[in-house]
Amino acid sequence: MKAPQSHSQTVSSRRLRSVRQDIGLAPIQFWVALASGLLWTALCALAALASNAAHAQAVSPAISVIPDPSGISTALQSHVEALLRQQSVPADADGGAAAPRRVEVVLGQLDPRLKLAPCDKVHAYMPDGVQMWGKTRVGLRCEQGPVRWNVTWPVTVKVWAPALVATVPLRPGMPIREADVRMSEVDIASSPSPALVKHAEVLGRSVVHNIEPGQSLRQDDIRARRWFAAGDQVRLNVRGSGFTIASEGMALTPGDEGRCARVRTDNGRVVCAQPVGERVAELSW
């Protein structure tokens, strides 16, 4: 007698059947694609474990703390410096985490109008959601004293690493040549937009606004690629939990990098997919 399926197995089966029907694959094509996707996912997981192990052994860059030149609240400043030296700098979004880095933390100044009551025990902490990146802040809380005050101390985290800078004035509409950029040490944390570190990311493309010599190139400075035009046949990669399925479709709107493109699948369904390559779009399920 066949054992009854659990609720989770039933939901999973329905979900996979829905994906297959939506993108118009025959059953045998679907299961072959699903098996390939599961194998690829397993290999990627093993590679990630190995990468994480290697990263854990890497030495974090030393953090240099530049004190507040005014000398205000020297006792409180020592608490802030001690906390900052214990922090780790997050990996930036541009993928340059493995590049040599030099980290500086510049302490700002507390509002001179603050009149803090004496405190026997001060606790320095990183506020929730705050990272060691760019303009940020550190919390100071009095835990033992006549008045329980709580203030934040402004700090600026500078992360110096090799990235692309302009060697000539760059103007919108002008294709970037190899001689127009070079690698130099820049503060990659000075802007929320990731610094660009690979020549292939900029060559042949143009900027969206004026860039002066010596200025670093950021992701937001470069005009987005158009991977395909409306009417082009595109490959549609459908990615879900533990599987990847390839299908075909026709683009109904241009495939601009970072923007949703409407794609009609073989069975007539219209989906919103992200352009990721030459005539390639990706859909997360």
Image: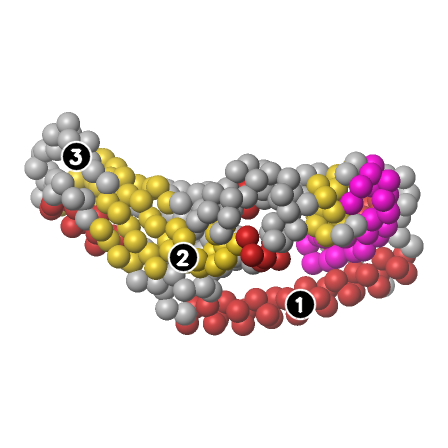
- The disc placed on residue 251 is none
Q: Is residue 273 above or below residue 243?
A: above
Residues at marks 3 and 2, CA–CA distance in whole angstroms: 43 Å
Which is more foreground, mark 3 or mark 2? 2
**Nearest the eye: 127 or 201:** 201
Which span is picked out in magenta? Answer: 228-252
Name the one closer to the observer, 129 or 230. 230
* Res. 221 in view: yes
Q: Which of marks 3 and 1 is nearer the N terminus?
A: 1
**Horizontal and vertical percent for residue 211?**
50, 42
Residue beneath disc 1: 42
Query: Residue 63: percent from the left, percent from the top?
Result: 29, 58
Q: Which of marks 3 and 2 is nearer the N terminus?
A: 3
Q: Residue 19: within the magenta?
A: no
Tell me which label, 1 or 2, sits earlier in the chain: 1
For this orientation, the residue located farthest to the top is 113
Whole-angstrom CA distance, mark 3 to mark 1, is 52 Å
Query: At x 77% / y 38%, what residue is drawn?
Result: 254
**For mark 3, what is the residue?**
148
Residue at 30 percent of width and 62 percent of height: 62
- Between residue 192 and residue 204, name the one nearer to us: 204
- Taking the spot 34% from the left edge, 59% from the top edge, the residue there is 102
- Is any part of residue 194 visible from this angle? no
- Mark carried by residue 185: 2
Viewer-nearest of discs 1 and 2: 2
Instruction: Decide: few, some or many residues near mark 3? Use Cα within 10 Å; few <14, some 14-19, many ≥20.
Output: some
Q: The N terminus lies in which quarter of the figure?
A: bottom right
Residue 124 place in picture, x, y as percent: 23, 46
Callout 1 amino acid: Ala
Give percent across and percent down for residue 107.
Answer: 24, 45
How was the colour assigned to the protein in this rendering?
A: secondary structure
- Give the residue type that dot 3 points to: Arg
